[in-house]
Image (tube, rainbow, N blue to C red):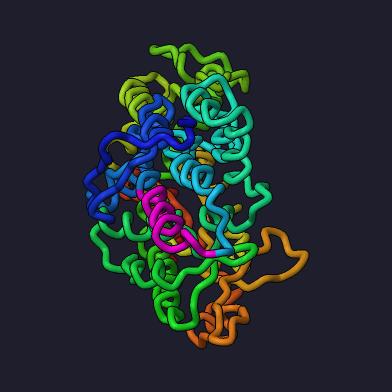
Amino acid sequence: MAYKDEKLSEEKVFKDPVHRYIHVRDKVIWDVIGTREFQRLRRIKQLGTTYLVFHGAEHSRFHHSLGVYEIVRRIVDDGFDGRPEWNQEERLVTLCAALLHDLGHGPFSHAFEKVFDLDHEKFTQAILLGDTEVNAVLTRVADDFPQKVADVIGKTYPDKLVVSLISSQIDADRMDYLQRDAYFTGVSYGHFDMERILRVMRPAEEQAVIKYSGMHAVEDYIMSRYQMYWQVYFHPVSRSAEVILTKILHRAKHLYESGYIFKQEPGHFRSFFDRTFALEEYVALDESILLTYFQIWMKEDDPILSDLCYRFINRRLFQYAEFDPATEYRKIGELEQLFAEAGIDPEYYLLADSSSDLPYDFYRPGEENERLPIYLQMPNGELSELSRSSDIVDAVSGKRRTDHKLYFPEDLLEAGKETNPLYGRILKLLKG
């Protein structure tokens, strides 16, 4: 029997708080899960700094990746199997892409990417195609199989239906992380009727579509996503922690480039600071390493690096104030000057941050990052774009919400305002 068709002698299951069980029968899937690159995802948090706000949010990208695999397995094995629009030969590549779609995430994913100008999807593809254990497993299926999985994740795979199951406006990735993140943060916003959506999902030529009778379940899903973004993913306190984390890495990079002598040589970061790192060094980095360095850097002689690390490790986060850049753009310049006069470096202690989300959009040809819309399969078999049938979705379609905040060390300013009148002026301007 060919390796791609091999089944385990007994089904393996992972007990899961969201899907109850993750089922594995394919030998390929089981072998991929056992690779060092996939096991590394246990050491990367799914929600980055959000655990400093919602204390239960300690779940990992390992959890999430298994969940996405399970949703896709149910779609292709229970919903699509036997339907003429679905090519059963695409089953294994679809399952592998679902399982491996987040393989390239770095520690504290988005903050780390921002500082070092990285793209986790490119690293996912590099791990799939490089000299890795994952690549060795996938190559046993076929020489070109790792490239096929990478193409699905890179959205260049010729079968667009396969791509849509992993990446679209209603995909397995979103369906898992909304429910999983809601469960571990303890909020109610992210829950929706996934069972109904899976029952009414149908394969079409270029994407999965939803039977018209399932429209209300999709409305619920879109509103759940909207609420999760503003109540959890864009929570201002979590953003404060991410701002500090980003500035820690910026400061360490600046000190390294300036010839600063660290008490503890930042060996794990040297190649990242120099932009000379190899894939193996990227894969070796996880959040436990970053947190270890932050603990050590609290005792560094540089007061900024030491203070920022202390703040992150001990949750002494920055306070925030609402900020409208369209009308208050002069405020930033004035505050930066006051911070500098007061002896506080504004580059590290006065930070503007914005969050933006578009809950749903229809197809706008030629626009950057154009989105493939969700289609309903009408009773006569024709497809109709979701917002044409749903008043709820129409109300939020194309409406981007953006939020701006200024982050600053209120504790430092409050403690020093009696001895330094500039601190009081700064506070008044920030809160005024």
- Whole-percent x and y of residue 337? 57, 47
Q: Nearer the viewer, residue 242 or 386?
A: 386
Q: Residue at x 61, y 78 (%)?
A: 383
Q: Nearer the viewer, residue 354 or 284?
A: 284
- Whole-percent x and y of residue 149? 57, 40
Q: Nearer the viewer, residue 336 or 242?
A: 242
Displayed quadrant of residue 368:
bottom right
Q: Nearer the viewer, residue 74 or 384?
A: 74
78 inside magenta stretch: yes
Question: Does the image show residue 306?
Answer: no
Looking at the image, is 64 positioned above or below residue 35? below
Going by the image, does 416 lie left or right of 90?
left
Going by the image, does 313 lie left or right of 142?
left
Part of the protein shown in magenta: 67-83
294 inside magenta stretch: no
Q: Residue at x 54, y 62 (%)?
A: 356
